[in-house]
């Protein structure tokens, strides 16, 4: 069975290599006759249809990827740990560097830290009119 399969592949490959037996549409002198413009028009129309179909397919794929990325964005919980060092003095007088690890989201905001409550704005002093 392998021999038959390989011999068929060889014969079909030779068919396209022998002049006069294969596709002759690749020779520009053969397809550019003023009396037979069909192949030239066909190739031009085919190229135009291919460009349009390719752009439509690309737009559909781009739209699909954008929808998927947009739908997944609210569920992105990417976090990082930022280490901040500060200096402390021990009871025996030594100065040491102490690390402080802070968990932050993808925008650099601390996670799990409540924001301080807003401070009330003091009222403007009443002006006395004479």
Image (spheres, rainbow, N blue to C red):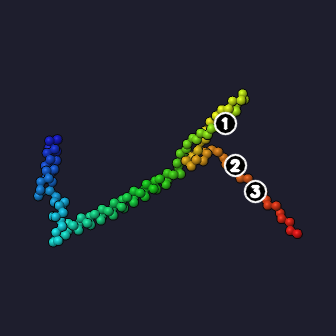
The residue that appears at 82% across and 61% down in the rendered structure is 125
Quadrant into which the C terminus falls = bottom right
Q: Nearer the viewer, mark 2 or mark 1?
A: 1
Residue behind mark 1:
87
Gap in angstroms between the C-alphas marked 2 and 1: 25 Å
Gap in angstroms between the C-alphas marked 2 and 3: 15 Å
| Image location (x, y in percent) of residue 32 | 18, 67
Q: Residue furthest right?
A: 130
Where disc 1 sits, the SS reads: strand
| Image location (x, y in percent) of residue 85 | 62, 38
Give the mark nearer the N terminus: 2 vs 3.
Answer: 2
**On screen, 100 above or below 106?**
above
Q: Is residue 52 left or right of residue 24?
A: right
Q: Residue furthest top?
A: 92
Residue behind mark 2:
116
How many numbered marks, from 0 up? 3
Gap in angstroms between the C-alphas marked 1 and 3: 35 Å
| Image location (x, y in percent) of residue 11 | 13, 49
**In the rendered image, which quarter is residue 120 located in?**
bottom right
Q: Nearer the viewer, residue 95 or 100?
A: 95
Where disc 3 sits, the SS reads: loop
| Label pair 1/3, CB-CB below 8 angstroms | no
Neighbor class of circle 1 (other Cα within 10 Å; few <14, some 14-19, many 20+) is: few
Q: Nearer the viewer, residue 75 or 88?
A: 88
| Label pair 2/3, CB-CB below 8 angstroms | no
Residue behind mark 3:
121
Give the mark nearer the N terminus: 2 vs 1.
Answer: 1
**In the rendered image, which quarter is residue 20 located in?**
bottom left
């Amino acid at each position: 069975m392998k021999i038959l399969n390989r011999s068929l592949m060889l014969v079909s490959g030779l068919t396209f290599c022998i002049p006069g037996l294969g596709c002759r549409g690749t020779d520009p002198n053969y397809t550019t006759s003023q009396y037979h413009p069909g192949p030239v028009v066909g190739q031009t129309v085919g190229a135009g249809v291919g460009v349009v179909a390719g752009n439509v397919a690309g737009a559909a794929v781009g739209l699909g990827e954008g929808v998927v990325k947009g739908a997944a964005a609210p569920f992105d919980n990417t976090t990082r740990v930022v280490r901040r060092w500060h200096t402390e003095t021990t009871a025996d007088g030594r100065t040491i560097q102490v690390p402080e690890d802070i968990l932050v989201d993808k925008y650099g905001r601390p996670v799990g830290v409540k924001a301080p409550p807003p401070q009330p704005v003091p009222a403007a002093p009443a002006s006395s009119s004479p």
